[in-house]
Amino acid sequence: MDPRLQGLLVGILFGIVLQRGRICFNSAIRDVKMTKDNYLMKLALLAILVETIGFHLAAQLGWIKLNPKPLIPLAQIIGGFLFGMGMVLAGGCASGVTYRIGEGYITAFIAAVFYGITAAAVKGGPLSFVNRWMGKPITTTNNPGGFYAAKDGAVNLTLANLLNINPWIVAIIFALLLLIVLVFWKTTERKVSGLNWITGGIALGLVGVIAYLSQKTYPLGITGGWVNLFRTTTANLDLTQPIPYNWEGMEIVGIIIGAYLAALFAKEFRLRVPKDPKTFVQVAVGGILMGFGAGSAGGCNIGHILSGLPHLAISSIVFTIFAVLGNWFMVWYLFERK
Amino acid sequence: MSNEVKPTYTLDERGEVCPVPDVDTRRKLKEMKSGEILEVLIDYALSKERIPAGVKEVGGEVISIEEIGPSEWRILIKKL
């Protein structure tokens, strides 16, 4: 099957799960601090647990090579913090603003457009000089068990290849820690009409594993997809050649279609427009910060958090820490400050 | 049943970006007096599920959640 068609189908599935699970990483991170509500956080951690086992199993069976994201410390620290602040202003993370387009959220559409264009400018566009300031990736030549994709012998850093031990050791310890947290951290009560945290978390994790088996080079992502859509659509193309839309670009289209269908079916589709025009400016600024952050860090809450943490990639661990700090800082600034 | 209760205040949160409906509801409840009723109008299912869980902490109790249109709800909350 054409990879682009596969990307579209995986995207539709992803969009349905996001919509029915009301999965938003911005809410997940924020609510733990602001309202002491861990419902979506537990859903996200369960998905990461399923993926940690799934990805390592797929690599063990030789179906894929694990391909962690490159570690550029400054990029993940600064980019993570900017991304974390941006998602609070935008009212949703990268996947959140993408699937909410399908639910009829005008603000999500505006945030996603500014996010995609800014990310494209930073990744190989007119703002790419920013990435040269951040420095070069730190890599290793360790490749325990041949689990990892190598480029000229260089492998991107994970906890396992940094310590040069069997990746299963780190994966199983990480999975057990997650399991302990999930079992002993009391779930905030919530009456849900869609997927609950257990069914939603398992479904999200499985979509991640399916995505890796389909795309091969990486599981789910959002930033690269928006960049591909904008760049290809507005490029000066040689039409005798195939048009370079890719798996991830079509995945974005699929997410919007899947969320639209799920919302329509559940009678939750509705055009939603904020009353105060300043909200449009706020979400546009949020989108720009997210694009700038994800563009330089090499991924967003999906690429780094949902897909990157199960690799135990150092880059994704650093990004996650600083995205959480950026989110909490902006939540404090906007909603908690006296 | 819920139509008999007359709200003291109304917040129209339709169209607002997440988490503004939750934050506004909690802020309003904090400054209300005991026995007063807050009516919140929302249009997003996630808010419908999150607001009831969040109001307990600020001394509120959900009296009713009523569907008033396609993906539109009216929540009545009493300050205890």
Image: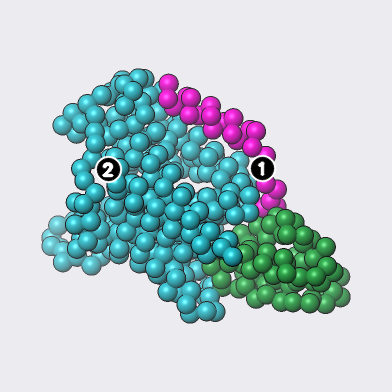
Chain colours: A cyan, B green
Tell me the residue that label 2 is attached to. A72
Q: Is residue A298 above or below residue A57?
A: below
Q: Is residue A121 visible in this depiction of the protein? A: yes
Give the residue displayed 39% in from the left and 52% down from the top.
A81
Secondary structure beneath dot 2 equals: loop
Q: Which mark is residue A241?
A: none
Task: Single out the mark in the foreground, 2 or 1.
Answer: 2
- Label 2 neighbour load within 10 Å: few <14, some 14-19, many 20+: many
Which stretch did the figure color magenta? Answer: A169-193
Question: Which amino acid type is marked by label 2?
Answer: Ile
Tell me the residue that label 1 is attached to. A187
Mark sitting earlier along the chain (2/1): 2
Give the residue displayed 20% in from the left and 31% down from the top.
A154
- Residue A32 in percent (x, y) is at 58, 49
Q: Is residue B68 above or below residue A35?
A: below
> What quarter of the picture does the N terminus of chain A occupy?
top left
Location of residue A237 (image quadrant): bottom left
Q: Do the residues indicated by labels 2 and 1 lie within the same chain of the protein?
A: yes
Give the residue displayed 34% in from the left and 51% down from the top.
A78
Secondary structure beneath dot 1 equals: loop
- Residue A142 in percent (x, y) is at 25, 24
- Residue B47 in percent (x, y) is at 63, 62
Q: Is residue A244 visible in this depiction of the protein? A: no
The extreme front residue here reads A338
Q: Is residue A104 toward the left or the right of residue A74 in the image?
A: right
Label 2–label 1 contact, CB within 8 A:
no
Location of residue A242 (image quadrant): bottom left
Check if residue A177 falls in the magenta segment.
Answer: yes
Identify the subunit bearing mark 1. Answer: A
Most frequent secondary structure within the magenta stretch: helix
